Amino acid sequence: MSSHGAPIPMTSRPCGPLTGEAKVPGDKSISHRSLILGAMCIGETEITGLLEGQDVLDTARAMRAFGAVVTDHGGGTWTVNGVGTGGFAEPDHVIDCGNSGTGVRLIMGAMATTGITATFTGDASLNGRPMARVTDPLALFGTQSFGRSGGRLPMTLVGAADPVPVTYTVPVPSAQVKSAVLLAGLNAPGQTVVTEAEATRDHTERMLAGFGAEITTEETETGRVITLTGQPELIPQKIAVPRDPSSAAFPVCAALIVPGSDVLVPGIGLNPTRAGLFTTLREMGADLTYENERTEGGEPVADLRARFSPGLKGIEVPEARAASMIDEYPILSVVASFASGDTVMRGVKELRVKESDRIDAMATGLRANGVTVEDGPDWWTVTGRGHGEVLGGATCASHLDHRIAMSFLILGMATQKPVSVDDGGPIATSFPVFEPLMAELGAQLVRDNA
Ligand code: S3P
C-alpha cells in the first residue's frame, strides 16, 4: 500500500547515459524544522525552497492544527505566522503525521511542555515505529504518554503544564530524539542539557541559534553536550532551504553506475553531519567532484558533479561515519552491487527501525536481483559483481519506504534486466519530482498501471 493512496507499481529499465542538471528539492530535515520553529515564534517566518513532499505537507497541516497560520504562496515559498513558544492551541482532531518519523517526533517535542493534550497517528509504517525513544525523555519534563503496546502510535501526549528542565543523554544516535528534547526544552525554565555520544545532524541546533535561542555545543570526552536556555523570545526568520543531500544521493549514484553518465547536481548542502555518503563514494573510487564550493545560510554548499565510474571498489565503511549517512545506506548498497569486492557496513542497527527495516528490505531485493548480501543485527555486507554484471529482473517490495523504492529504481538503470517495485507511491514523501527529474536525465521509468 502507498502511504496516501493505491499502490503505484513501477519499473526501471536499463538506460543510456544520464546527462544534464538535476535540481533536487529542498532538504527534508530543514523543511520540517522551518515550519515547526516558525510556529514556535510570534510573527512571520518566510521560507523559500521548502520541500513540498507529503511528509512536510503533513507537518504544515499539523502546525495549523496547533494554531499557526501556515500559507503556501506557490513556488516553494511559504509563510508561518507562529503562536510563540508554549503558545500551541489544543488541536480538535487527531494529528496524522502520515509516513514521517521526523514530523511526529519533533512535533511531540514541540508540544510536550505546553500543557495541552494531542493525539498522534500515522500510516502503517509510522504506526509500527518505536516512539518510547522520544516519550521516555519527554516524561522527564513531566509529559505523559498513552500509546499502543511497544510505545507505538496512535498515541496521546498530555503536555507538562509546569515543565522542569532536563539533562539527558541520548541512548541511540538519533537527531530526532535530540531535537525532540531540545524543542521541549524551549518551553521549560532553566537549562536543558542534551548529550550525544555520536554527532548526528545538527540542523536543530543551528536553526535554534538562528531563531535567537541561547544554545551552545561543547565537544567533550563523552560526546557533544548541547545546552539550551529555556523560554527564549524566538525571532521570526527568513529561511532559504538548501537542496537535500539525501535526495541528491539518487541522481549522483545513478550517474556513477550508468555507463557514459555525467550529471551536475547544483547547490547541495554539505554539512559534515550529512555528507558521509559522498566521502564514502569517493573512497570507493567514484568520479565525484565538488564544484563552486561556497557557504550559504551558514551551511557549506557545493555543486556535485558525478560521472560514470567503472572502477568502483568495495570498502569497509567506518562505523563512526554511520550517523552522517544513515539515510543513504540503501542507495550505497546499490552502488556497492556494481563495485568489485565487498562493501562492509557496520554499526547500522538504526537502519532496522526506519520507515522499514532497511537492511532486510535491501538485502531481500538485492538477492532477488542476483547480488550476494549477508547481514546480521547491526551490519551487512554487499559483494559487488562489477559493472554490467548485475542481473536484475525482480520485483522488489518497497515496504512503504521512499528510499527503498528509489534505490531499487536506480538499480534497474544499470542491471541487465529491468527492476520493478511494487509501490513507488512513497517516493512522494520526500522527492515528489523524482520521476520527471530522472526521466529528464535519460532514465527510463514507467508506471506499470499507467
Ligand atoms: C532526521 C533524522 C534521522 C533520519 C531522518 C531525518 C531528522 O532519523 O533518518 O530521515 O531530520 O532529524 P533518526 O533521528 O531516527 O536517526
Image (cartoon, helix red, strand yellow):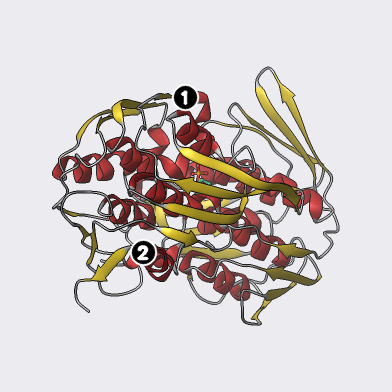
In this view of the protein, can residue 325 be seen by the observer?
Answer: no
The residue carrying mark 2 is 442
Task: Name the residue nearer the viewer: 413 or 296.
Answer: 413
Q: CA distance from mark 1 to mark 2?
A: 35 Å
Q: Up-down: is 220 above or below 88?
A: above
The reply to whether the C-beta atoms of the residues labelled 1 and 2 are less than 8 Å apart is no
At a point 47% along the width and 23% down the height, the residue shown is 318
In this view of the protein, can residue 60 be seen by the observer?
Answer: yes
Q: Earlier in the sequence, mark 1 or mark 2?
A: 1
From the Cβ of disc 1, is ligand 1 less than 8 Å away? Answer: no
Q: Which image quadrant for residue 157?
A: bottom right
The residue carrying mark 1 is 319
Q: Is residue 46 left or right of residue 198?
A: right
Q: Residues within 10 Å of mark 2 (few under 14, many from 20)?
A: some
Task: Name the residue nearer the viewer: 194 or 276.
Answer: 276
At a point 41% along the width and 63% down the height, the residue shown is 441
Q: Which mark is residue 398?
A: none
Q: Is residue 281 left or right of residue 449?
A: right
Q: Up-down: is 235 above or below 310?
A: below
- Residue type for callout 1: Glu
Q: Measured from the top left, where is residue 225 in percent x and y?
A: 71, 30
Marks 1, 2: nearer the viewer: 2
At a point 31% along the width and 75% down the height, the residue shown is 5
Q: Measured from the top left, where is residue 425 in percent x and y?
A: 32, 68
Position of the N terminus, as image quadrant, is: bottom left
Q: Which image quadrant for residue 371?
A: top left
Q: Residues within 10 Å of mark 1 (few under 14, many from 20)?
A: few
Q: Measured from the top left, where is residue 423 in percent x and y?
A: 26, 64
Q: Measured from the top left, where is residue 299 in percent x and y?
A: 71, 47
- Residue type for callout 2: Gly
